[in-house]
Amino acid sequence: MKRRLIFLFVFGILFLGSCSKLPDAGNSNSPGSTGLPDSVTSFKTNNNDQIVIDSRYMVNNNEWNIQHTSFPCSEIIFKGNTRGSDYFGWKWSMNNPDQYTVLTYPEVFCGDTPWAPSATHPVDFPFTIAGHGLTSSFNINQTTTTAFGGNTYDLAYDIWIISNTSNPASFTSKDIKCELMIWLASANAIPDGLAPTGSITANGYTFNYYYSPTQGGSPHTWTYAAFSAGSGTQIFNAASFDIAPFLAYLTNNGVLNPGDYVCTVELGTEVSIGEGITVISNYSVVVTTK
């Protein structure tokens, strides 16, 4: 999440998928003047605002690097219901003089984040890699648009892993061992500006592997590992997206230890510049015991 992106000089408007049970992502007849779908029941506009979804998930208006730009920007998180189907999402407008740098990561998270541990997190987090399976489901309708001279983003899982030497009942960001990202879609961006060092086939797609051993700041650093389906690939629907193969790849290559703990699973849109809206339904994160 905390990184720079390489900007590829491609412009245009991307219409990135659809789902029959989701509202139109671009509906301008909105509650108030937000431009949100008519069926929205709740929305928030401030940095770090949160909306609880079914007690297990939290939508977070995570403008973690918005101070990087002095230009006006906006971001909204929301939830709603259409034709009996619940949904949630986020809408953004980001003006950034530096198209390489991520400004924001609106997201939905499940677990106990090392950045702000909570005593009320789901009871199945954190969990060891070796003893558990991890899958997720989703239906996504996303539209992004070139604005302010660019359209740079990725839609990705962001999974935080703490060391097997950590106390799973009491940990902080100092215990982070690895940040694992899985890019489901992207435009004009490459993970951290890195060159791929391998690949993996999982869930019917081929993902390039990117690796950096020194993320974070002094004195504590961690490994950044990213798997990207590549520009042009759009993974917007999955009944059971298996995350375990990515964890196994990192374990087999010595990046992770089988006893390390997954403490949070996040899904969001990293945005550097441009405008867009993401609407998600049928979302789940499922932890199973082996």
Image (cartoon, helix red, strand yellow):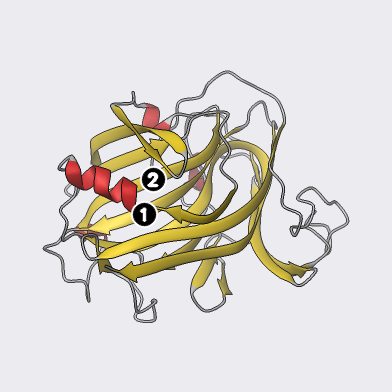
- Tell me the quadrant of the picture where the C terminus can be found: bottom left
The residue lying toward the viewer, choosing from 203 and 109, is 203
Picture quadrant where residue 81 is located: bottom right
Label 2 Cα neighbours within 10 Å, binned few <14 / some 14-19 / many ≥20: many
Q: Earlier in the sequence, mark 2 or mark 1?
A: 1
Give the percent coordinates (x, y) of residue 126.
29, 69
What amino acid type is highlighted by mark number 1?
Ile
213 left or right, relative to 62: left
Residue 191, compared with residue 268, is above or below; it is above
What amino acid type is highlighted by mark number 2?
Met
User: In percent of the image, x 15 and y 61: which residue is there?
Assistant: 259
The residue positioned farthest toward the right in the image shown: 29
The residue lying toward the viewer, choosing from 165 and 218, is 165
Label 1 Cα neighbours within 10 Å, binned few <14 / some 14-19 / many ≥20: many
Residue 57, compared with residue 154, is above or below; it is below
Q: Secondary structure at mark 2?
A: strand
Give the numbered dot on residue 10: none
Q: Secondary structure at mark 1?
A: strand
Give the percent coordinates (x, y) of residue 139.
62, 55
Give the percent coordinates (x, y) of residue 158.
41, 51
- Residue annotated with mark 1: 159
220 left or right, relative to 89: left
Report whether residue 90 is seen.
yes
User: In percent of the image, x 44 and y 57: which residue is there?
Assistant: 266
User: Tags 2 and 1 in contact by the CB under 8 Å rule?
Assistant: yes
210 left or right, relative to 93: left
Picture quadrant where residue 127 is located: bottom left
User: In percent of the image, x 56 and y 43: which residue is there?
Assistant: 235
- Residue annotated with mark 2: 181
Give the percent coordinates (x, y) of residue 162.
23, 59
The residue positioned farthest toward the left in the image shown: 165
| Count of picture labels | 2
